[in-house]
């Protein structure tokens, strides 16, 4: 009789998809940075053992058994039980684009532990933040994650010649998605792009290079966070290869 191969993993819950009447397909990001998709049998059954243990954006310790197409969750526990109850509507709306981006750019079998660390920090901080703070953390997390995945935009320096952009207020800067980011005046004639208020680029650079505490200490308002998100939207769509539905919703939901 063959023995079923089982393994243990700590992971973040990114997505849940209905399967049949009682089951779920759970998309997770393991602590090694690999994307995982597992079946949680009975997870939608009232009173089932998994019903309340696979909360979105939570860190879990799970045991799974190897399956033919998808592995099967056999046991799961919260790694940190206190964190999941603090996601209100605004916090959930801000965490969702982060989870969707990770689901898009991470791959099965490809270890990227830095992305797990970023996601873990982002979800934890969003859960503890006010609505406006959560919006800023979302914007910062998206630019940090897409950059860490290898698609960092040029912001403080021209993507073409490397000269400083000069992020002073009161001017517009050409931003080229195909070219690689911000463009100086001398190189602007050679590339296609769109004009962006330099403050949006300056804030995007700050969100990329600063820690969450440093960002929140500057009290960026919703208009600032939305400007950063609007700048990132075409960048993410180009380099991640798809639109993020949750980001579209965040930009149009009028919650903030």
Image: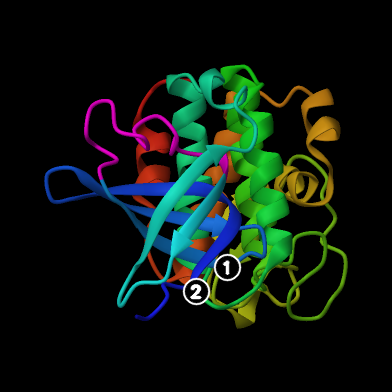
Label 1, on which residue? 34
Range of magenta residues: 42-60
Q: Nearer the viewer, residue 197 or 253?
A: 253
Asked whether residue 196 is drawn in magenta, I would say: no
Q: Let me know if residue 165 appears in the view.
A: yes
Residue at x 76%, y 75% (from the top left corner): 186
Residue at x 12%, y 44% (from the top left corner): 21
x then y, percent, for residue 180? 64, 74
Q: Position of 256 compared to 121: left or right? A: left
Label 2, on which residue? 108
Quarter where residue 190 is shown: bottom right
115 relative to 98, above or below = below
Q: Is disc 1 placed on a helix, strand or loop?
A: loop
Q: Residues within 10 Å of mark 2 (few under 14, many from 20)?
A: few
Marker count (numbered):
2
Task: Give whichever of discs 2 and 1 has the lower sequence position.
Answer: 1
Residue farthest toward the front in the current orientation of the protein: 1
What predominant SS class does the magenta segment belong to?
A: loop
Q: Residues within 10 Å of mark 1 (few under 14, many from 20)?
A: many
Q: Position of 161 compared to 249: left or right? A: right
Considering the image in quadrants, where does the N terminus appear? bottom left
């Amino acid at each position: 009789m063959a023995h079923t191969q089982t393994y243990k993993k700590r992971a973040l819950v990114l997505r849940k998809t209905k399967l049949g009447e009682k089951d779920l397909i759970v998309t997770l990001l393991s602590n090694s940075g690999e994307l995982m998709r597992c079946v949680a049998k009975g997870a939608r059954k009232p009173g089932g053992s998994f019903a309340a243990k696979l909360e979105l954006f939570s860190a879990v310790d799970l045991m799974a058994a190897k399956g033919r197409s998808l592995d099967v969750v056999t046991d799961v526990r919260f790694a940190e039980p206190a964190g999941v109850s603090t996601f209100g509507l605004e916090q959930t709306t801000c965490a969702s684009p982060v989870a969707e981006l990770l689901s898009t750019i991470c791959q099965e079998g490809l270890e990227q532990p830095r992305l797990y660390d970023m996601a873990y920090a982002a979800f934890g901080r969003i859960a503890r933040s006010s609505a406006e703070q959560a919006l800023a953390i979302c914007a910062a997390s998206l630019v940090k994650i897409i950059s860490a995945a290898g698609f960092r935009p040029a912001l403080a320096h021209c993507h073409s010649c490397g000269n400083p952009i000069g992020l002073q207020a009161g001017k517009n800067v050409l931003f080229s998605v195909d070219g690689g980011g911000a463009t100086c005046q001398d190189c602007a004639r050679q590339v296609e792009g769109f004009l962006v208020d330099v403050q949006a680029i300056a804030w995007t650079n700050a969100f990329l290079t600063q820690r969450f505490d440093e960002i929140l200490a500057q009290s960026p308002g919703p208009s600032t966070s939305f400007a950063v998100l609007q700048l990132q939207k075409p960048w993410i769509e180009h380099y991640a290869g798809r639109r993020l539905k949750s980001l579209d919703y965040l930009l149009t939901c009028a919650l903030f």
